[in-house]
Image: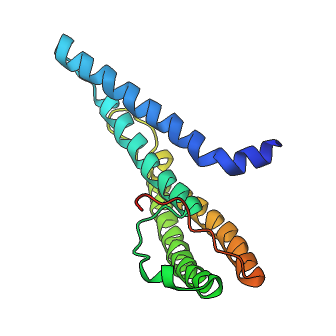
Amino acid sequence: MTFLKQLDQNAERWLLLVFYVMLVGTMAVEVLRREVFAYSSLWGEEIVRYSFIYLAWIGAAAAVKERAHIRIDVLLHYLGPRPKAMIYIFGDLVMFTVAIIALYWSFETVLVSAKFGSVTDGLRISKVWFLAAVPLGFTLMIFRLGQSFVRDFRSLRDGTPVYEGDKLFD
């Protein structure tokens, strides 16, 4: 399997793993330091907070890719493949529009932070690196929605069942 195919299939998983390990590892060290040594650091809390923010936005993009967002699809079970595909395409179009608008406004926040040189309290690192999680998440969502459009239009054209993602409950 080529590198690009691996990246396409697993990019969000790898990023989620990195941020999750960073979050859990830092939190474990901070709990140990606080309980055993009665000392905690400001930077540990910041690493956990910003790792969680990246987890949320990258996880949202992964959910778009896998169609894992919460939805009520009781009525969709009674539709044929073509109407179901059209409804999914409509939903993706709405999400795509919202993501484009949110991407635009999230860049403004990053640019203001860069302009004024704001830094984090504990790490003293530019907040741009952490605020960039939001536009990164929306960019990944837009990319995954583009892939979803291609997949759904192909299903619509061929009359095959549309990809619905894995079911959480049956």
**Quarter of the rendering occupied by the C terminus:** bottom left
Residue at the outermost top position: 37
Residue shown at 83% from the left, 43% from the top: 2
**Residue 159 horizontal/vertical position (percent):** 73, 82
What residue do we see at 71% from left, 71% from top? 151
The answer to whether residue 58 is above or below residue 47 is: below
Where is residue 12 drawn, in percent x and y?
58, 48
Question: Which of the 4 image quadrants contains residue 92?
Answer: bottom right
Is residue 10 something one can see in this rendering?
Answer: yes
**Above/below status of 65 relative to 82:** above
The image's colour scheme reads: rainbow
Q: Is residue 137 above or below residue 15?
A: below
The answer to whether residue 132 is seen in the rendering is no
Tell me which corner region of the image, top left, top right, bottom left or bottom right, holds residue 165: bottom right
Q: Nearer the viewer, residue 153 or 79?
A: 79
Where's residue 118, x and y in %? Answer: 40, 48
Residue at the spot x=75%, y=76% of the render? Answer: 154
Please tell me how many numbered marks the rendered image carries: 0
Q: Quick one: quadrant of the N terminus? A: top right
**Residue 97 on image: x %, y %:** 54, 79
